[in-house]
Image (cartoon, rainbow, N blue to C red):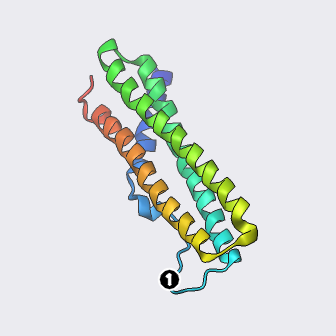
Amino acid sequence: MAFTLWPFLLVQKCAKDSEETYDEDVVEIRYEADEDVTKAMAIEDWEQFLKQSQQDIDEADTNIGLLEAKIDETDVEEKYAWQEVCDASNLALLKLKASRAKQNKEFESKLDNYDKTLYQQNEFFETQFHHEMEAINKKLNNLFEKMKSGYYK
């Protein structure tokens, strides 16, 4: 009995943690548009982004894993709806991980010839990343809320 409830309790905790506004969790270093962003400043900003984004990715991976555990325990009727959310979230997260890795590689390859546009490209990428991560979390959180409310029984 305790084993059966454990994944659901974790889902509730993770979903609750993810309900916090995204901006509160994100620590970003931002510079003014007219500020001269040096190579060192851009690297510091990017490293902070990589650290924070990895935490966000790990949380989403955990929530997807917990959802997969719930899918294994649920009735056939709910299984299809939950699996659809799980698959879509997992695919979106995989694409996001790949684009993050690609952006990191591009950033590192252009560092020798650094100019401010590289920082601006990263800034744009970071904004897009956060929006896409928020969409993934919203989809998962909506399902977790339905589970908690008894919508799925």
Q: Is residue 12 left or right of residue 78?
A: right
Q: Is residue 92 left or right of residue 55?
A: left
Location of residue 110 with respect to 3 vertically, above or below: below
Which residue is more in the foreground, 94 or 36? 36
Q: Secondary structure at mark 1?
A: loop
Q: Image quadrant of residue 47?
A: bottom right
Q: Mark 1, residues whose alpha carbon is within 10 Å: few (<14), some, or many (≥20)?
A: few
Q: Is residue 77 left or right of residue 107?
A: left
Location of residue 109 with respect to 17 vertically, above or below: below
Give the residue furthest to the right: 112
Which residue is more in the foreground, 149 or 28? 28
Give the residue furthest to the left: 151
Residue 96 seen in the figure: yes
Quadrant of the image containing the C terminus: top left
Q: Residue at x 51, y 61 (%)?
A: 126
Q: Position of residue 146 (x, y in %)?
A: 28, 34
Q: Residue at x 70, y 64 (%)?
A: 110
Q: Image quadrant of residue 43?
A: bottom right
Q: Residue at x 41, y 55 (%)?
A: 131
Residue 17 seen in the figure: no
Location of residue 42 with respect to 150 vertically, above or below: below
Name the residue beneath numbered marker 1: 32
Amino acid at the residue labelled 1: Glu
Q: Position of residue 127 (x, y in %)?
A: 46, 61
Give the residue furthest to the top: 76
Q: Position of residue 55 (x, y in %)?
A: 58, 51
Q: Position of residue 100 (x, y in %)?
A: 58, 51
Location of residue 138 with respect to 149 vertically, above or below: below
Q: Residue at x 56, y 73 (%)?
A: 29
How many numbered discs? Answer: 1
Which residue is more in the foreground, 87 or 58? 87
